[in-house]
Structure formats: C-alpha cells, structure tokens
Image (spheres, rainbow, N blue to C red):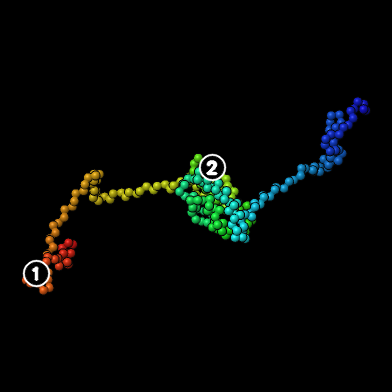
C-alpha cells in the first residue's frame, strides 16, 4: 500500500487494470483512440449457403426406378391424404404438373409410378436442379377448401417436400370471383308497332282455323289382263295433290 491506495489487480479484460475501483485501459488502446484508429470489431461470419438436397433417388442415368418408388411412396401417400381431407372437389385432383394429365383416382400411385418418374426425368432434362429457383420450378400448388389450416398446399415433385402454405395469388384459386352476369338488353318499343296482349299462363291456345281441303282424287288403275271394271282405288295424280296442299 502506498498512501492508502489499494494494490492494482487485473480485470477480466485484456489490457485493462482495475485501480481504486476504476478501470484503466492499456496505453496501446488509449493511443489508438487518440489517433482515431478503428477499434477491432467482432469477426464477420459469412451467411451459410443453402444445403443441397440429395437427388440420388432420381436415378437420372439408370433404368432402375425402385429407389424413386421407395423414396416417394410415403410422401405421395401423405399428399393424397391431405388433398382428400381438404380438397374443394373430390371428383378431381387437378392436372399433374409433370405429366400434364388429370390426376387419376389414386394420386399416390401415379406420383411414384414409372410413367411419372420417366416424365420427371424428361422435365429435368436428365440433370439435377442447379439452383433453388430451378428446384422450385417443380413445385405444384393445390387450392384447399375453407376451413383448412391454410388456403393452399405445396408439393415438390423432385424432393417430395410438402407443407401448408398461402395459395399463390397469381394462380386460379378457390375464391376466384365468377364473372358478373350481364343484364339482358330489351329493345325499346317502336312507335306505331302493334303490341301483343299477354297470354295467361296455363291457358290453352286456340287452334287457328284451317281452310277446308279438297279430297284427293281417287282413280281406278286397271290391272293387266283384267276384265271391264277390274281394278282397285289408288291416288295417281301426285302433282295435283301436292299443288292442292300448297
């Protein structure tokens, strides 16, 4: 002790000492501040790049579809169950994004089936997606009925990743307004034109009187080899009968 001053003790920080309850910084730190030099800050951590999904189940260069079947069967079944529970129309699941055909009744077996797998490889051009944007190109959205957890459901045909989501506004959605009905245009009555009286509903219409028609002329056509008076009644003058009718 010198003149009652407590001994200096080291603090937890580097280059600092605690003397008499006050923190004194090292000479180097004080000198840097006087010269206006920047103090060292926390280290900069670069943003982690998104993890690349595993595409080995696609078997892009193979004819063996079994890995794709095993990978996609459970995911496709879960999708079919969700759409069955929350779809607006159970008579139609929509059009497959990959095959461009109407989904069959068994949606799950279509998605993990051979034809869908082949069409998916063609859509990928037998190459793995090169970016998250390219991968998202194979995501299909389904519109859900009111009361579902969200208005839409998304399913990626490459990875099988799926979840509830807001239905995209740029797609025809469940709440798309129907076009307004166009009122019928009734022409205004023309001055001087005759006006027909309304006919009572259910009243029988009177038959229009017809002019009496003359009876068709009946002639006797002789039978070859017959005697006098042989024959039977028959209308022969078709042109005259047609003219009379007209």
Query: Picture quarter containing residue 29?
Result: top right
Q: CA distance from mark 1 to mark 2?
A: 94 Å
In the rendered image of this protein, does residue 30 appear above or below residue 99?
above
- Which label sits in the foreground, 1 or 2? 1
Question: Does residue 145 appear in this view?
Answer: yes
Could you tell me residue 147's position as x and y percent? 50, 40
Sequence-wise, which precedes: disc 1 or disc 2?
2
**Residue 81: image x %, image y %?**
52, 45
In the depicted structure, whether residue 145 falls above or below residue 157: above
* Residue extending farthest bottom: 225
In the image, residue 53 sits, relative to residue 14, either above or below, namely below
Q: Which mark is residue 107?
A: none
Q: Quadrant of the C terminus?
A: bottom left
Q: Position of residue 183 (x, y in %)?
A: 37, 47
Q: Which residue is mark 1?
A: 230
Secondary structure state at the residue bearing disc 2: loop
Q: Which residue is mark 2?
A: 150
**Point 72% across, 48% down: residue:** 46
Q: Residue furthest left?
A: 228
Provide the secondary structure element on which disc 1 rests: loop
User: Residue 228: horizontal and vertical position, in percent?
Assistant: 6, 71
**In-image side of 181 versus 243 (left or right):** right
72, 239: nearer the viewer: 72
Residue lying furthest top: 4
Q: Is the residue marked by circle 2 packed among few (<14), some (14-19), or many (20+) residues within 10 Å?
A: some
Q: Quadrant of the N terminus?
A: top right
Instruction: Give me the residue at 52% from left, 53% from top.
Output: 110
């Amino acid at each position: 002790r010198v003149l009652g001053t407590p001994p200096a003790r080291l603090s937890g920080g580097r280059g600092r000492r605690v003397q008499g309850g006050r923190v004194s910084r090292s000479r180097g730190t004080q000198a840097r501040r006087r010269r206006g030099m920047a103090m060292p800050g926390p280290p900069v951590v670069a943003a982690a790049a998104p993890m690349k999904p595993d595409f080995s189940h696609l078997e892009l260069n193979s004819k063996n579809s079994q890995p794709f079947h095993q990978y996609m069967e459970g995911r496709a079944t879960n999708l079919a169950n969700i759409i069955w529970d929350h779809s607006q129309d159970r008579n139609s699941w929509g059009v497959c994004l990959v095959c461009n055909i109407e989904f069959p009744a068994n949606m799950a077996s279509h998605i993990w089936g051979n034809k869908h797998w082949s069409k998916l490889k063609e859509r990928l051009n037998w190459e793995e997606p090169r970016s998250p944007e390219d991968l998202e190109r194979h995501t299909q959205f389904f519109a859900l009925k009111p009361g579902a957890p969200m208005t839409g459901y998304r399913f990626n045909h490459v990875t099988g990743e799926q979840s509830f989501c807001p239905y995209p506004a740029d797609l025809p959605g469940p709440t798309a307004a129907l076009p307004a009905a166009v009122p019928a245009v009734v022409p205004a009555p023309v001055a001087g034109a005759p006006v027909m009286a309304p006919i009572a509903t259910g009243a029988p219409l009177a038959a229009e009187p017809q002019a009496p028609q003359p009876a068709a002329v009946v002639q006797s056509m002789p039978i070859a080899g017959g005697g006098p008076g042989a024959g039977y009644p028959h209308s022969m003058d078709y042109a005259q009968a047609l003219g009379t009718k007209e």
